[in-house]
Amino acid sequence: MESWRLSGKRPFLSTWHAATSTKLTPPRSTILQNQPLDLPRWHPIPHLPQYINPPNQTTIISKPNPAFKRFSEDRNEEVDSSFSQKLHANAESDSDEPVDPPKVEEKLGAVPHGLSTDSDVVKREAESMSRKSLRNNAEKFEFQAEVSRLMDILINSLYSNKDIFLREIISNASDALDKIRFLSLTDKEVLGEGDDTKLEIQIKLDKENKILTIRDRGVGMTKEELIKNLGTIAKSGTSAFMEKMQTRGDLNLIGQFGVGFYSVYLIADYVEVISKHNDEKQYVWESKADGAFAISEDTYNEPLGRGTEIRLHLKDEAGEYLEESKLKDLVRKYSEFINFPIYLWASKEVDVEVPAEDNDSSDDEEKPESTDGEEKEDEDSDKDEDEEKPKTKTIKETTYEWEHLNDVKAIWLRSPKEVTEEEYMKFYHSLAKDFGDEKPLAWSHFNAEGDVEFKAVLFVPTKAPTDLYESYYTANRSNLKLYVRRVFISDEFDALLPKFLQFLMGLVDSDTLPLNVSREMLQQHDSLKTIKKKLIRKALDMIRKLAEEDPDESHDHKDKKVAEVEESKENDEKRGQYTKFWNEFGKSIKLGIVEDSTNRNRLAKLLRFKTTKSDGKLTSLDQYISRMKSGQKDIFYITGSIKDQLEKSPFLERLKKKNFEVIFFTDPMDEYLMQYLMEYEDKKFQNVSKEGLKLGKDSKDKEVKESFKELTKWWKETLASENVDDVKISNRLADTPCVVVTNKYGWSANMERIMQSQTLSEAGKGHTRGKRVLEINARHPIIMELRERVVKDPKDARVKKTAQLMYQTALMESGFLLPDPKDFASRVYDSVKTSLSIDPDAAVEEEDEVEEVLEVEVEKHTEVSHEDIKDEL
């Protein structure tokens, strides 16, 4: 920054001086010629086509008009093509006049040798930088664009999937049909007579000539509309139509023949558009997307009556779009719920009876020989049969007929009260592509109004996909289909539902959702957050209602009305439905609690688990709280892998005796769940295998702790090599001598096993193992005897071994993995020797050498026997 101050020159001032004294008059021919589109500084803008009207045919080439027009900013008048020449002349005349250089004043004040710009120069620079309009004395030119190159970029960059061309054409046809239907509300004669009154879309194939035809009986286009809508890129006829008709009605149309029309050039190299409007003759528009198109009066094609027919001459590599099955799949995927019927001219094989040939001699050759009398009788009977039934045979014949492709109705556009259960079932099976007899567990049909309006239908499927959780965070898929005005947009858009609700099926249809030009990606908009928020709330309400309507979920209620409802047949169908849901999608609810802090409490209400008092049935947190003892402040739970093992856990002994209910969490996901679900309804969760368990105070606790103080201190020193943090008197044991608990915020024994079993885990790395505490049962005889022996002789080696063996046994019973199983086994065997009065130093008897010799002889004998057998063979 200081280099220009030291040099005494300001670089931008010298540049300004050079610019004012230089003639900017490049050769006009150089500037006006077409420049390549990929020049780094040129930004091509497509020109509006200029056209004239010869008698028969109009050929329009999109090239720049040399007689361009511009408006002068100061004089506000039109300027013709001579404007640039006048400016050029003025520039030459003005260049001879001297230009005053910028004034610089020296100030020798606080900054020695410093320079400062005078006030006039600063003012001129500020005006120059702030202006956003062209200067009056500058020579003006038009940007040049190679239209064919621009079309190529437009077509191949906007669309990544060729299949969407049919969706765009059908959407345009639907818009045209919407327009004529709207106009017919005030003037019924616009529909015409006969077939013209049928508002439908037809698709036809010509495999020999590689032509795909899409026809509609919509409003059609005039010659001027063909030029404007198809000749100008991104021209939307529907937007202008909506502005014109805004005061007369509400039309929700996408935009006819906008950028979407040009997607046809993904699969076609030549396109014909034949259109007939009620007010004009029939015209044909044709183009190869090479920068030119032609329009002529159509005198050689079949009269349309009214509407538009698009003929796509397919490229060689687009032959798949001549297959009927491919077109059926595309229509049912993208345009299944278009308001108007879509028909395909499809082939079909039928059995046809045709007259049999008379020269068939095969039957005569196969007939056996017979007598003359029999032959006469057979001839008479054959004559009678021939007179009664003519000879025919059945052959396969290919016929063609119009096949209706979109027979499923868009039920979400109707009021939920008007839709029957059978219609919901049919709609669900069409979405799931499953046409079995199973019903969805629940569904929700609603209309959202407000800043963002949309309609949606959500279903809870009966079964979860087999790979639902295998690629939970990596799969970019969604069972929720996104529609805009009944046109399918995408089913790979996961921004409308969070990951944990991706199992839901359904669709969302919005008339106000902002889309980019290709309709394949949604813009980042605040309306998406609003839609997502409403969908989550409706989805959770639907699942909550499923639980409330299940009679098995209300077995704790004593309301008479509930009992009456349980007897109804309708409730018998709903019995056990939420249990089915939980078995299939319970893990998703747990993932939601981990991921969605906003709806954590609502999701917690949907949790189900088994407890010590649930008799093997699932219960909820609300039901658990309703059964809590008076004065109980915490929700007790224990984690493990098998429920039967947890029921026998020493951690539950005292809790069971005091009639406390304990939740069993046996899913590995539960360990992660409880790290986020810290409390519910002002009740904190307490893991009974960790420190901090409070079951009420006992007046003798202090006396007991004092009497066992010497033992706990000695035991802690004995287990110093085992990294035991402390030895305490337990308040949770009843029949077991001791257990090992962990710190309140550390890993439990179950969590340690889960982390060690991870595929990419490394032993001794990344483990945040909690501090271990040995809790002893002061009332157990083993502990009391151990205290007496420690008081007599704290250095007794046998007592120390017993203490270490008890710790390792408690470690294993508490669910931990033993660090050294061999050492534990050796201590157990030593204890067995002592109980059997065997000398601890007794050695194992050595093997007899004779037995080894015998084994060698046996081996030799077997080898000889094998050789003998070989010789005999």
Image (cartoon, rainbow, N blue to C red):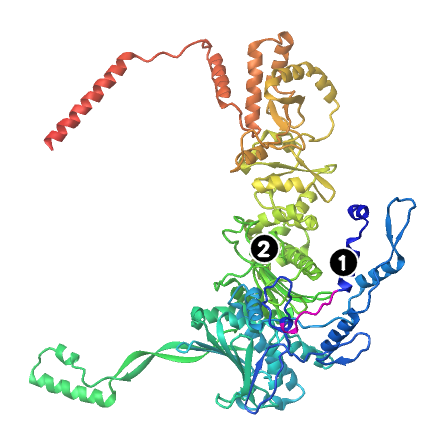
Residue depicted at x 58% and y 28%: 814
Which numbered circle lies on residue 15?
1
Gap in angstroms between the C-alphas marked 2 and 1: 61 Å
Which numbered circle lies on residue 502?
2
- Is 445 placed above or below 585 here? below
Circle 2: is it few (<14), some (14-19), or many (20+) Cα within 10 Å?
some
Looking at the image, residue 710 sits to the left or right of residue 871; the answer is right
Near-viewer residue (487 or 449): 487
Q: Secondary structure at mark 1?
A: helix
Name the kind of residue labelled 2 in the image.
Gln
Circle 1: is it few (<14), some (14-19), or many (20+) Cα within 10 Å?
few
**Residue 450 position within the rendered picture, expressed as x and y whole percent measured from the top left:** 73, 66
* Range shown magenta: 22-29
**Residue 507 position within the rendered picture, expressed as x and y whole percent measured from the top left:** 60, 64
Q: Earlier in the sequence, mark 2 or mark 1?
A: 1
**Residue 857 position within the rendered picture, expressed as x and y whole percent measured from the top left:** 21, 18
